[in-house]
Image (tube, helix red, strand yellow):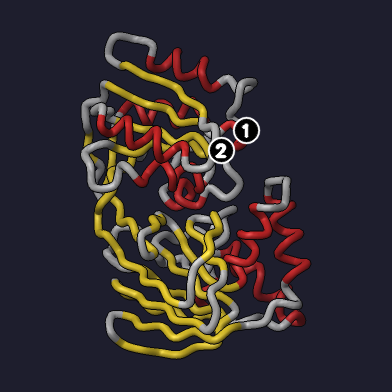
Amino acid sequence: MEAKTTKVKKILFIVNPISGSGKNNPLEKYIKERFGNPDFSYKIVQTERPGHASDLSKTAVAEGTDIIVAVGGDGTVNETARAIIGTECALGIIPTGSGNGLARHLKLPFNVTKALDSIGAGKFIKIDTATLDDKVFLSMAGVGYDAHVAKKFANAGTRGFLTYFKIVSSDYKGYKPRKYKLILDGKTIKRTAFMVSFANSNQFGNNTSIDPNAKIDDGYIDVCIVRKVPMIRLPFILPLLFMGKFDKSLYIEIIRAKTITIKRKKGKAIHLDGDPYDSGKQFEIKIHPLSLKIIVP
């Protein structure tokens, strides 16, 4: 997709200090060096609580801000984007989180100065967004084991890939697959699955992918129905997640759809871009084509 250019005047940086971008980070210095001239008006605000990024973003959109930059992980990006969807404001990302799924999918720079240069250039594309009932996700949502892990990770007290890996490995053996009824664009199927992921992008985070062919601007959600891999097979199957070949395994079924209804016996956790939420026995997912402007290199 060809990138377009927009004139940038007013920029808000929303910084999640827990993601490693706090007081001791030189980010503010880099921003001043790049945007401290008459062509730009910028502001830097740190989030203070869950949901704060959404509130800051909503206010900034109402004030006519041109670009709102999320400095943090997928959760911060998700919160920041909610108020931007469907507006003329553009989302920028400086990835500092654990997974950084959307940034990896879009091949955004992880180097701060390069990311700021991209934001200053103001090139953007439009991407699809999705909702699970009334909740937004940009990259990935899921039920089953990945949602179970997301909930435990959120309450673990420490962040990072090592904490995530410890939870995944310790809980894997005891987690039992569950039965789901899926209505995909009006067609009903039933599956017993270890987890069901809803992919708007090809990134699960940390450079892993269960659906390497997912596209973020095609108007579809890829429904990834994953069977539990036997313990004896894990050493052979897990590398496929990092190689972008998990879709070739016998343990996944991928169906593309625009509207998705999920029914299950019990209300359990779900995750949206890695953040856990409680949900009931039934929920609906919809795609919103090309509804978000996002800054790219």
Location of residue 247 in the rendering, given as x and y in whole percent from the top left corner: 50, 75
Q: Earlier in the sequence, mark 1 or mark 2?
A: 1
Q: Which mark is residue 180?
A: none
Location of residue 146 in the rendering, given as x and y in whole percent from the top left corner: 59, 67
Amino acid marked by disc 1: Gly
Under circle 1, the secondary element is loop
Amino acid marked by disc 2: Thr
Using the rendered image of the protein, determine whether residue 251 is visible from the camera's viewpoint.
no
- Up/down of 188 relative to 210, above or below: below
For the point 64% across and 81% down, which residue is it? 228
For the point 75% across and 80% down, which residue is it? 231
- Up/down of 284 relative to 45, above or below: below
Find out whether the residues at labels 1 and 2 contact each other: C-beta distance under 8 Å: yes
Image check: 207 left or right of 189? Answer: right
Location of residue 113 in the rendering, given as x and y in whole percent from the top left corner: 48, 25
Q: Could you classify mark 2 by the number of other residues whose Cα lies within 10 Å: few (under 14), some (14-19), or many (20 or more)?
A: many
For the point 65% across and 75% down, which residue is it? 237
Location of residue 61 in the rendering, given as x and y in whole percent from the top left corner: 28, 33
- Up/down of 220 relative to 97, above or below: below
Q: Which mark is residue 20?
A: 1
- In which image quadrant can residue 16 be found? top right
- In which image quadrant can residue 170 be found? bottom right
- In which image quadrant can residue 216 be found? bottom left
Image check: 53 left or right of 37? Answer: right
Taking depth in this image into account, of 21 and 212 the one nearest to the observer is 21
Q: Could you classify mark 1 by the number of other residues whose Cα lies within 10 Å: few (under 14), some (14-19), or many (20 or more)?
A: some
Image check: 171 left or right of 63? Answer: right
For the point 46% across and 46% down, which residue is it? 103
Alpha carbons under labels 1 and 2: distance apart? 6 Å
Residue hosting label 2: 96
Under circle 2, the secondary element is loop
